[in-house]
Image (tube, helix red, strand yellow):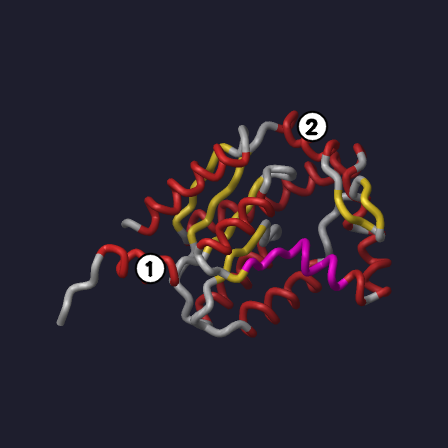
Amino acid sequence: MRAKTPAQTNKAKQSKLNMILLGDPGAGKATQGAYFAKKYQMYDHDMGRELTLLRQKNKSFDKVQAKTGDKGALTPTAIVRGINKKIVLGLPKSKSILFDGHPKMLGEAKLVSKYLKHTGRPDPLVIYLRIPQSEVIKRIQKRKGYYNTKFNQRADDSVQALRNRAKYYRKNIAEVVNYLKSKYNFRYIDGTGTVAQVRKRLQQAIDEYLNK
């Protein structure tokens, strides 16, 4: 049997790459996630995008988000779990997935792990982008987004919402991080600097993981 070339071996590893990309609010998860999902041909499972689409289609859910997400609280977990089930179990088992910015609660993390195992997908590389709290507030206050059909600041980016989000993160993300650390290859990455600088750090972590 002919031996595989390094390029063929690397391609095979890339096709099996699954990732969970977490991080502090405003750390650039969506930007980096979209880039690496495309590069490694992973399905970019962006929960924020999924919730936005659901909100546009479902007026009842729009009212729920107005009482939770717009005030900085997390979206009801039953909705998030349903989306995860639909996507992870609905995609071809050969399709790798990048979980872009989630799971954010322990129960959701356990279900994601269960679905990955059920579909026979390789264990994911888990990366957490960290930025200082002062940088979180600075970035999010400047962030703009397409919301309610016009280009303006997101409804969940008010000062009070930022404080609420920080509280939820302290309580929930710590549990998620500890759980994922106990199961998978976990890396903290410095999220400060330019997009290119952060991307380089992420690429190094991915290369180290794939080359093990």
The residues tagged by marks 2 and 1 sit, at their Cα atoms, a distance apart of 39 Å
Task: Report whether 189 appears left or right of 139.
Answer: left
Q: Amino acid at mark 1?
A: Lys
Task: Report whether 111 appears left or right of 76.
Answer: left
Residue sitting at x 56%, y 58%: 44
Extent of the magenta region: 44-54
The answer to which quarter of the image holds residue 123 is: bottom left
Q: Which of these two is toward me, 3 or 118?
A: 3
Is residue 18 within the magenta segment? no
| Residue 189: image location, x then y, percent | 47, 36
| Residue 162: image location, x then y, percent | 74, 36
Q: Amino acid at mark 2?
A: Lys
What secondary structure is the stretch in magenta mostly built from?
helix
Q: How many marks?
A: 2
Q: Mark 1 highlights which residue?
A: 11
Depicted 93 relative to depicted 47: above or below? below
The answer to which quarter of the image holds residue 202 is: top left
Q: Which of these two is toward me, 107 or 15?
A: 15
Check disc 1 and report its element: helix, strand or loop: helix
Quarter of the figure that contains the N terminus: bottom left
| Residue 96: image location, x then y, percent | 46, 63
Q: Mark 2 highlights which residue?
A: 138
Residue sitting at x 46%, y 68%: 95
The answer to which quarter of the image holds residue 134 is: top right
